[in-house]
Image: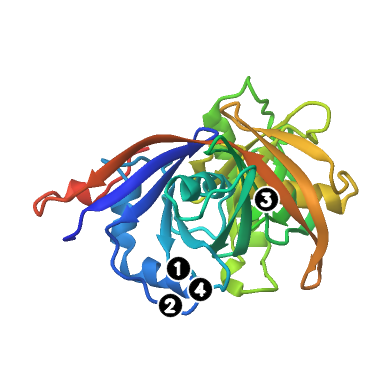
Amino acid sequence: MNATLRVVDMHTGGEPVRIVTAGYPAIPGATILEKRAYVRDNFDHLRKILMFEPRGHFDMYGALLVEPCLEGADLAVLFMHNQGYSTMCGHAIIALGRHALDQGLVPSREPSTEVRIECPCGLVVADVEVRDGKAGHVSFESVPAFLFAGDRTVDLPPWGPVRFDVAYGGAFYALADCRQFGLAFGKSRLRDFVDAATALTEKVYAALPLSHPDHQDLAFLYGTILTDGGDGSNVPTKNVCVFADAEVDRSPTGSGVTARLAAMHARGGVRPGETRIFESIAGSRFTGAVEKVTTAGPFAAITARVGGRAHYAGRAEFIIEEDDELGRGFLLR
């Protein structure tokens, strides 16, 4: 590594977003998925430097800005975490919407500015509220989201039969009521949520092959979202998303809220325009609503509008000394 890595650190609802602003070599590729594959195959050592200790931690999350491939996109992004590279990240979109205006990547206009962000899952359009020249609340319209498999059951020792859905919201998630595991938000340990969610992810991954009408690279189970069983209509519905290598999302999870809305809509549980409130394990909240009814290949689908706030945490420059083996990244859990 010869170049200095420069980053801007933000968080959305408590979930970190380390935005890489400089230090990566040029990334070739005619599509965003080709760029994602190239970074995975050639620059994964940089992900470990940025995400792992001693500069990051087990639950760090990152966003790498790259040249857009889609006409009309203002910017393009690759998402990274402790295991690799995801296809969509709603909390990062919220942070990038604000970041794009603050850094002049997109001209700011009051009362709202549109930021078109190309993601591996497709084009995501963020709307950034602007007041007195300052960016504030950000919402985005998701890519088409759908219920892939509903009311499935697996035998999951030691808990027994567990009922779940699998839904796509830019990434595929297993969705399950935490009470099936004897868990309750505010009472059970986070470790127990992580263990239950990880076990369900592994079981569903082995039992249920996935497919996506756009590209097979999108057809992988990203993680499990455990919920309180609510729908967010009268009181906020709580959930925790455990994704990648047992990474815990501190935010309500933008793509997860999208997946939950798709599953709820498929059952008639939410209509277009109805706003629901989703609360994370850390107590932060996102709004979510069905924006449009659409299709995704053979699936009845929706697009969702998810909103929240992002804040800055700092800026940094990272280097590696030649004899620093631990500086290349390690994880303790």
CA neighbours of label 2 inside 10 A, class few (<14), some (14 to 19), many (20+): some
- Residue indicated by mark 4: 69
Q: Could you give the CA–CA distance between mark 2 and mark 3, rounded to whole angstroms?
A: 31 Å
- Residue indicated by mark 2: 29
Most extreme residue toward the left is 323
Most extreme residue toward the top is 187
CA neighbours of label 3 inside 10 A, class few (<14), some (14 to 19), many (20+): many
Looking at the picture, how far across and down is residue 78, in whole percent? 46, 60
- Residue indicated by mark 3: 174
Amino acid type of the residue tagged 4 in the rendering: Cys
Please tell me which residue is depicted at 17% across the width and 51% down the height of the picture: 320
- Residue indicated by mark 1: 36
Looking at the picture, how far across and down is residue 287, in whole percent? 70, 38
Amino acid type of the residue tagged 2 in the rendering: Gly
Whichever of labels 4 and 2 marks the residue nearer the N terminus, that label is: 2
Which is closer to the viewer, label 2 or label 1? 2
Q: Could you give the CA–CA distance between mark 1 and mark 3, rounded to whole angstroms?
A: 24 Å
Residue nearer the viewer, 270 or 24? 24
Question: Which quadrant: the N terminus?
Answer: bottom left
Position of 160 relative to 153 (above/below): above
Which is closer to the viewer, label 1 or label 4? 4
Residue nearer the viewer, 2 or 241? 2
Which is closer to the viewer, label 2 or label 3? 2
Secondary structure under badge 1?
A: helix
Amino acid type of the residue tagged 3 in the rendering: Ala
Q: Is residue 82 left or right of residue 296?
A: left
Whichever of labels 1 and 4 marks the residue nearer the N terminus, that label is: 1
Looking at the picture, how far across and down is residue 242, in whole percent? 56, 43
Is the Cβ of the residue at disc 2 closer than 8 Å to that at disc 1? yes
Q: Could you give the CA–CA distance between mark 1 and mark 4, rounded to whole angstroms?
A: 12 Å
Q: Could you give the CA–CA distance between mark 4 and mark 3, rounded to whole angstroms?
A: 30 Å
